[in-house]
Image (cartoon, grey):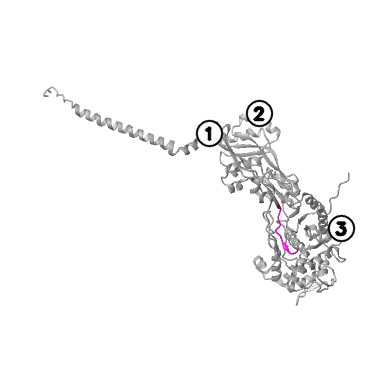
Amino acid sequence: MVKPRGPRRQRLKNLNAEAEQFRRRAMLGFLGIALAMVGLAAGYFRLQVLQHEEFETRSDANRIKPRPIVPARGLIYDRNGRLLADNVPAYRLEIVAEQVEDLEATLAGLGELVALDPEDIARFREQRRVTRGFRPVPLKLRLDEGELARLAVNRHRFPGVEVVPYLTRRYPYGELFAHIVGYVGRIDADDLAAMGDSRDAALTHIGKTGIERFYEERLRGRIGYEEVETNVEGRPLGVLRRHDARPGADLWLSVDARLQQAMVDAFQGSHGAAVAVDPRTGEILGMVSLPSYDPNLFVNGISRRDWAALQAPSRPLFNRNVLGGAPPGSTIKPFMALAGLEYGLRTPEQQTLSTGMFHLPGQSRGYGDWRRGGHGYVNLRESLAQSVNSYYYQLGYEMGVDRMDAFFDRLGFGHPTGIDLAGEVSGVRPSRAWKRRQYNQDWYPGDTVNAAIGQGYWVTTPLQLAQATAMLANGGVRHRLHLLQATQSGFNAPKVPEPMPPGVRVVDAPDHLAAVRDGLVAVLHGPTGTARAAAAGSPYLIAGKTGTAQRVSRRGSEAISPNSLPYHLRHQAWMMAYAPADDPQIAVAVLVEHGGSGSGAAAPVARRILDAWLLPPVEAPP
């Protein structure tokens, strides 16, 4: 049975304990609030004071957008102020990828308004792949007026798409200076990678060849930028600050447009190369490589059709002066004669017998003269005038390849001339070391005999031959060939001459030089000179030497007429010359491809070039 409970006792409240407990809890609460306020204050202090600049920058980045200012590219002039590379106004279509919601739909829509080639789309995708999303990427360059009008009407449909005015490159002389001035082209992935993340990445074009490439940094200038305030949609509201760009420097070249055209005309449709030099300074007065091409095709991207047309067997894109070369043939003989005098192996009047065939001791194989039956006894002057091979066979055999190599090394053969164009080749100066390195073979006396008349392993560029010819003309000083004459940094700024290193004296024997130069005059003005037909009627004295670089050799003692050979097997025709012989003002080297003979093909070209520079221009009839 359950015992009933009694009444429950009520516990008495301890008011003091409850008050103490409330105080403790209140203190903890206030302490928590205080700590929270301190933490909040510390947070505000960190944001407002310690990290003020960082967050201000982030805020401005959302509101202020930097916009690059691409400077005008420097102009290029010839020595008389004729414009060789110009800037003309144009418009391009650009897309900022991060502002476009559907890129494919945007491209499709734009394709309805402007003519977009598959190549334009491909280049856009390639460049976009390596460009940050906030940077504009060009889609199409050179919009025409109809495309500009259609884009203006439909501008609201394409956020992130802009029509940007700019200056584009134009080459007024087209093919005439293509291998000197070169061209600019659209920047590709390799160019962007080389630039990194610098402001220069805002460029759309860069020098690809010629002067445009070699002096790219001078011509490019320095990109500026402006700080543009935008709204939440990215639309520009105004320019807050502007940091002006620095325009590229204008370049003045040493070439003369009138002479350049005369050099092209002098070839009369033949293929080849020619260099004209001021022997007193090393300045290039004119330089042609034929056939040539129109550099304007490359500025905004060349089409497949135009590119295919330039892949012809005649190689119009190939710069024969900088990248080409051929055995120099008999144009090497003046330098061999000079070497013979320098080494004491010959005197100007010492004679050598030419019977029509030269034999090395103990060998039955003969090395022939161009004249069957030989030239008889000839001295240095007549050896040059008549281009007597036997004289130089014997001289080369006595000199030996080692001394020959050392002397031609001094003259600059086998080395780039240092011209301010990229990619210049060294050619080949044959020697024991070169043959061992190239073929792992010994050097033989027959190699020396061939090298003595500019055949065999020799490869000489027109630039090297022009530099050596200028050395003979100016009295033994070798100058570095160059194209840049002066720089002008600003419209009203003075032209600043380009500093040039002093010439190097490589021959210090005036009597030796005089003997060789006398022989070179006899080539064109002497009664036995091989090129006297080219100098007929000249009002000034010409010194020079023709050369024929054989592509096939004779069979035994049988002579081969160059003109009877197929075109691709005909000999290369050379001519080196300077004039006036008594006061040289111009030196030239001419190479006519497959010309057959130097006297028949190259000498007339050289004469026409010299006339164009030294004689007053012929006025056109009214």
Badge 2 amino acid:
Val
Q: Main secondary structure of the magenta part?
A: loop
Residue at numbered disc 1:
63
Residue closer to the observer: 521 or 374: 521
Which region of the structure is painted magenta?
475-484
Tell me the crowding category of disc 2: few under 14, some 14 to 19, or many 20 or more residues within 10 angstroms, Cα based.
few
Labels 2 and 3: the sequence-earlier one = 2
Q: Is residue 570 in sight in this rendering? A: no
Which label sits in the foreground, 2 or 3? 3
Which label sits in the foreground, 3 or 1? 3
Residue at numbered disc 2:
153
In which quadrant will I find the N terminus?
A: top left
Badge 1 amino acid:
Arg
Please provide percent x and percent y for residue 359: 78, 74
SS class of the residue under badge 2?
helix
Labels 2 and 1: the sequence-earlier one = 1
Residue at numbered disc 3:
539
Q: Is residue 505 in sight in this rendering? A: yes
